Amino acid sequence: MTTRKRCPLEPVPISPPATASAMLTRCIVRRSFSSHRLSKNVTFYMSEHVASTTRDHTCEDQTPLTIMLPWLGARPQAVAKYCELYLRTGFDVLVVESEVQEFLWPRWSLQHGKKLLELLHSDRFVSRPLLVHAFSIGGYTFSQLLVLVSEDPQKYETLTKRIKGQIYDSLVAGSVELMASGVAKIVFPRWETTVKQMSLLYFNTFKRQTTDYYNRSIQVFWNSPVTAPALFFYCDNDPLSDPCALEEVIDFWRGRGITLTAKKWESSKHAGHLKAHPQEYVDSLETFLHSLTLVPLKAKM
């Protein structure tokens, strides 16, 4: 008897170990959504009902796909709430997790971005209209993907046109010092000051391998090859995001002709606006999605 070889992009059953992605899967699966682990840090979520009745895995699938890039240290239960918002309204969701080492050594995040680009060009996703939803440092992960796109814009022209909308929630904006502070606060909160100082020393020592990469990705983000309508969520009291720096990006993008909506609160929580202001957040997100050239939404959020 011969053994069938598994296609590289064929769904891989999620195993029981309590990894972050496995816990996120359990949070969503119990609500009638299926999951497919595509790689260590990438998990694909879709409605079980849709999957079993109308969906095949060919390139004809036109279901809109949300590329969700969570914040570092995101709790699975928190990410699941955002996934559900999209799954209920007819989107599939591709959760792309980031790791702190990818931030500390940008070449690794570029490798991560290259694999994501290859995945988005695979048969399963090549015809999908795309929506990007990046939280906090997830925006950095997406900017690394943009760096690759900007190096060969002709090759990725079809991909950039498939991106119909982009959402940035609590985007880490400002200096390298602010980014170092953000990593320390999120990953090592008990030793925040020490870790921040060590990080800055590390960035200074390995400037060519770190800071130069960050500056390049920031420049590419400002002049992003993706010009789809954008929605920014932010607040005045976010210790990891300078609202003035963020508003400079917003104004610059508007000057480039990008349709842009900004939802700002005086007081909220970093990557926690949905919890702090649930109705305003959902209303803003829903209004934005309805304004895009996507398939009609199946249900209200």
Image (tube, rainbow, N blue to C red):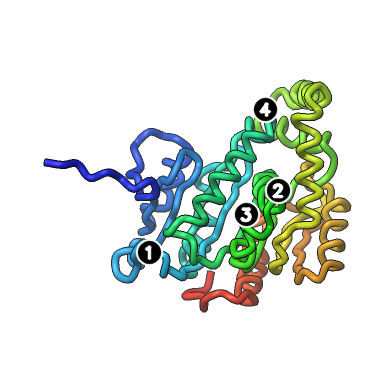
Report the number of discs.
Answer: 4
Q: Earlier in the sequence, mark 3 or mark 2?
A: 2
Among the two numbered marks 4 and 1 on one chain, the one whose residue lies closer to the N terminus: 1
CB contact under 8 Å: marks 2 and 4: no
Q: Are marks 3 and 1 in contact (CB under 8 Å)?
A: no
Q: Give how far apart the Cα atoms at labels 4 and 1 are.
A: 43 Å
Of residues 256 and 175, the one drawn nearer to the viewer in this rendering: 256
Q: Which residue is mark 4?
A: 188
Q: Picture quarter containing residue 14?
A: top left
Contact between labelled residues 2 and 1, with CB atoms less than 8 Å apart: no
Residue position marked by numbered label 2 in the rendering: 147
* 204 on left or right of 13: right
Earlier in the chain: of badge 2 and badge 4, it is 2
Q: Where's residue 46, x and y in %?
A: 41, 59
Q: Residue at x 72, y 30 (%)?
A: 184
For the residues labelled 3 and 2, the Cα–Cα distance comes to: 32 Å
Residue at left offset 83%, top offset 25%: 204
Extreme-left residue of the structure = 1
Camera-nearest label, 3 or 1: 1
Please report the residue visible at 38 percent of the width from the left and 33 percent of the height from the top.
Answer: 17
